[in-house]
Each structure stands twice: as C-alpha cells, then as structure tokens.
Image (tube, coloured by chain):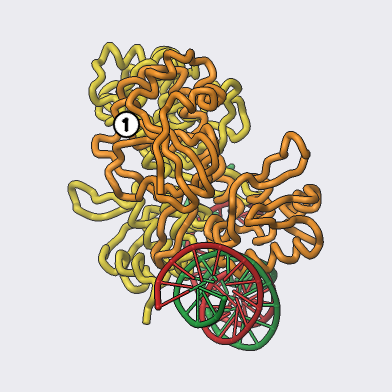
Chain colours: A orange, B yellow, C red, D green
Amino acid sequence: METKLSVLNAVPELSSFHLFKDISKDDLLQLCANGTVKVHQHRDLVFRSGDPANFFGVAISGAYKLSKLNHLGHESIIYFASPGDVVAALVMPAKVPEYPVDVTALGCSRMLLLPREIYINYWMKRPPLIGCVQQLLSSRMARLHSLKTMQRAPLTSRVASLLLDLSQEDTQTRVHCIPLPLTRKEIADTLEVTVESVIRIMSDWTKQGLITTKDSSIHILNLDPLKQLMRDVTTP
Amino acid sequence: METKLSVLNAVPELSSFHLFKDISKDDLLQLCANGTVKVHQHRDLVFRSGDPANFFGVAISGAYKLSKLNHLGHESIIYFASPGDVVAALVMPAKVPEYPVDVTALGCSRMLLLPREIYINYWMKRPPLIGCVQQLLSSRMARLHSLKTMQRAPLTSRVASLLLDLSQEDTQTRVHCIPLPLTRKEIADTLEVTVESVIRIMSDWTKQGLITTKDSSIHILNLDPLKQLMRDVTTP
DNA sequence: CGCTCGGTTGATGCACATCAAAGGCTGTGG
DNA sequence: CCACAGCCTTTGATGTGCATCAACCGAGCG
C-alpha cells in the first residue's frame, strides 16, 4: 500500500513551496523533525474522519481529496489539496484534535507526515510560517465560499467554474489540463449533484470539442467558451 | 451610525472570551493597542468585500453576518459571528490583504477593531493566542462543511439543522432561542434557497407549535420534532 | 398617508433527481 | 484462458422539489 521515504530526499521539493520560502535548509529539517514521507497509491486513505489527529501533513506530489460522508452515506468532497498544501493543520491546536474529514490520495502521491507536537512546539512559534499556513487556509476557505455562492447558478456554470478552477496551464505545451485523476462522480460529489447530470453536461462539451478525457485526465481544449458558460446566468 | 468607545470598558467582556482565557489584563491591553470599540446599529456595514483589509475584528456583543453577493446580485450568507469570534483574522498575513466578504451587524452590536499590524506584530507572536484563533476558524470551517454535506438533503432537514445549530439555551428560562434577529430571507440566503420555500416550511412549524417568532427573534418550543426532521431523510 | 419591508399564499413550470439498462475496462480467481 | 465482479461512463424515460411569478396583508415610519 504505502511506503516510507527519508525526509531528506524531499528537501528540494519542500524548499520550493511558498510555505517554506524563506526557511534555511537547517531550519527546514528542524521543522520536519520526526517526519516521514509516505508514498500513497490511488485511493489510499491517509486520515479518517473522526480519528484522533496526531499528525498533520504537507502534500509533496500528486493530489489528495478531503471528503466526508453525508446523511445518505454518499461522499461529499470538500477540497482538493495540491503539492505545497497543508492538511489537518487547523485542528492541531485543539485539546483533543480529531480529523474533520477523510483524506484520500488521488493517483500516486507523496505526503510529509509530521507529529502534532511539532506543529505546537515548532511551527506555531514561527510567525512567518504561521502566516503562510493561514494564507493556504484562507484560499481554501475562499474556494468553499465560491462553491457556496454558485450553488444557485445553473449546473452548467458550476461545472465550468470547477473545471477552470482546478485546471493549470502546462508550462511546456501550454495546454490547460486538470492535474489530478478525476472521475465524473468526484466532480458530482464536489458540486453535490448526481453523476448523470455531470455526465450529460460534460459529454456535450466533449462532442463540441471543448474538452477531452484521456485516462481520467481532463484537458480543456478551448477556455473561452467555458468561461462564457461559467458567467452565463441569464441567457436571453 | 456607529460610535466609538474606549477599549477599557470592554476589558471584562474580552477577558471572558475563550480567545483571551489565559491572558493577563496588561497583556490584553497590549494585544488591543490602537484598538477601538465600535457600536453598530442593525444592518451597519463593518467591512466591505474587496476593500483593503487594514483591520481585523473581535465581536464583543450582538452578532454579525459574513456574506457575499452571488452572480445574480443576491446575498449569500457564509457565517454568523457571535461574541468572542474573530473576523478577517485569516487574511491579515496576506501581502495585500482584501476582505473576502461583507461583514454586517445584526441588531445593535459591538466590535473591537484592531489594525493589521497588531495582528502581525503581536498576535502572531503568541502561540497560545494563534491556537485559539485557529480553533475558531476550525469550527467555522466545520459549519461550512456541514452546510455543504447537507446540500442534498430535503430542505426541511436543512432548515431544522440550521435553526438547531444557531439556537442557544437561555440559562435562566431554559428556553431555546436564536440569539440574533434573523429574517426568513437570511435563512434562505444561508441555505441558498428562496424565501418562499423557507416560509412554507417555517409557517407549518409555527402552526404545529414547534416554533414562534417575536420581533424577528425565533424561539424553539419543541426540540425533539426538529431533531427528528433534521435526521429524516428517507421517510418511508 | 404613502412608503418600504417582512411575511404569506397559490398557480405554474422547469432543472435536476431518480430509476433502469447497457457497454467498456480492470482486476481477480477458478 | 475465461468468467465474473466492480467501477466508470453513457443514454433514455419519468417524476418531483423547489423556483418563479404574482398578489396581498400588516406593521412601522417619515
């Protein structure tokens, strides 16, 4: 399932994250004391909602989804964490911390896991680092807000908005794609709708040549029509 | 509209908040340096979404709503802040911070406003305080998650859940009521539905004697049926 | 007195859910 | 090697919860 690596190997990647931007290599090793780098396969569960939260994590490569089960036992996806994102940091200061969500790997991914005490004793004593953590949380919060305010928009706009939000421009090929293996079901679970509705919308777009899907990797071929659909509310 | 008071008068209330629980009066005054206590009337706007965020706030009395406008210009309510809650703290560490939401007083309320520099220079250098701030944010995040995961439940459950979430037991009369002036429109804007739908549900409950409304203050007369409705998903 | 604002009710329609069925693809085990 | 199970995707037929639109009432207020 999962394998451990030395933290040392991950130092170059870690240093490249905004989170650790002004931190020397020595400091970085102190901040990662007792840490382990774990390699997860697709769908590996990292943290389970409700479990005692003795560790927090920093995503290094790949991607992770944060989700909960709703009243019917269906998955509700809260957030997608990318490399450089922290998970479970916010609950560390609680007296008896519990993970509020399930954290699951999407595709083969790596995460740095650190004990709670490290957060309390080292991380929280460094204002610049705390500032970065809060900025990450702030942008996660902003994404939640945006999903919430779009809740009453037509589903077409919401799917377009999500895809554009998650897509990144490949620096080489200049192609816009979504850097995580994402099924239609997961898109539906993020927007709190059914798979069928998402599929009806996205297969239209595929037929129109706006997007393609290869090995559950979604590419956006034509940005502008999607941006248009995202805004379209009153189509007179 | 709004009036200023000396911070000194608010010290007893501030000390009673979990946020400042282990902080001496002298320390408290340092943490509130250059602060002002403002008194807001119902519907006064405190921060406007998009404005440069030079201040953050601590709610002292009354209540505040955090909201944004959606694509159609309708209000979407993100959160209700109660006494002891912080607002705009999360965006303080950004290089060029902007308020992500509108903050509006609900009823006559008081808020301690503090300059951004105070957060950066004093608050962030106190790990226990940062811990408390993160706990507040964590519970706000949890409420957002809960609204999100209930999105596909029948509206009846969602209204019941919101009312129960916001209600507090009066320590004297042992009556459960919602400690903020809340219109049906605001409930609708929190759940992202229309007023009419909320009204249809709540007037049923009023007729059944489950709730009453006096001067836009909602009282819950009978908890258990509402709790039942909240859970009810499959009503066979 | 006319105004606005919050609450209420009814008639009608639509966007999305639900249910059903089927095909492709992957991995697993006989 | 094939049979089978499970997951993802797709499509169509049908249903319904909530939105939309319209109208009205009562209370507070300049």
B210, B66: nearer the viewer: B66
D3, B174: nearer the viewer: D3
Query: x and y percent of residue A90 in the render?
Result: 39, 35
Crowding around mark 1 (Cα neighbors within 10 Å: few <14, some 14 to 19, many 20+) is some
Residue B111, placed above or below residue A181: above
**Snapshot quadrant of residue C23:** bottom right
Q: Residue at x 61, y 70 (%)?
A: A196
Residue B208, placed above or below residue A150: below
Q: Residue at x 72, y 38 (%)?
A: A170
Which quarter of the rendered picture does the C terminus of chain A lie within?
A: bottom right
Q: Residue at x 49, y 64 (%)?
A: B152
**Snapshot quadrant of residue A199:** bottom right
Query: x and y percent of residue A82 in the render?
Result: 54, 39
- Side (left or right) of B62 relative to A63: left
The answer, for residue B55, to whether it is visible in the render is no
Q: Check disc 1 and report the residue beneath it.
A: A115
- Side (left or right) of D22 relative to B83: right
Provide the chain ID for the residue under circle 1. A
B14, B147: nearer the viewer: B147
Query: x and y percent of residue B25 in the render?
Result: 25, 15
Judged from the image, the secondary structure of the residue bearing numbered disc 1 is strand
Q: Residue at x 27, y 43 (%)?
A: A52
The answer, for residue A51, to whether it is visible in the render is yes
Mark 1 residue type? Pro
Residue A126, placed above or below residue A55: above
Total numbered circles: 1
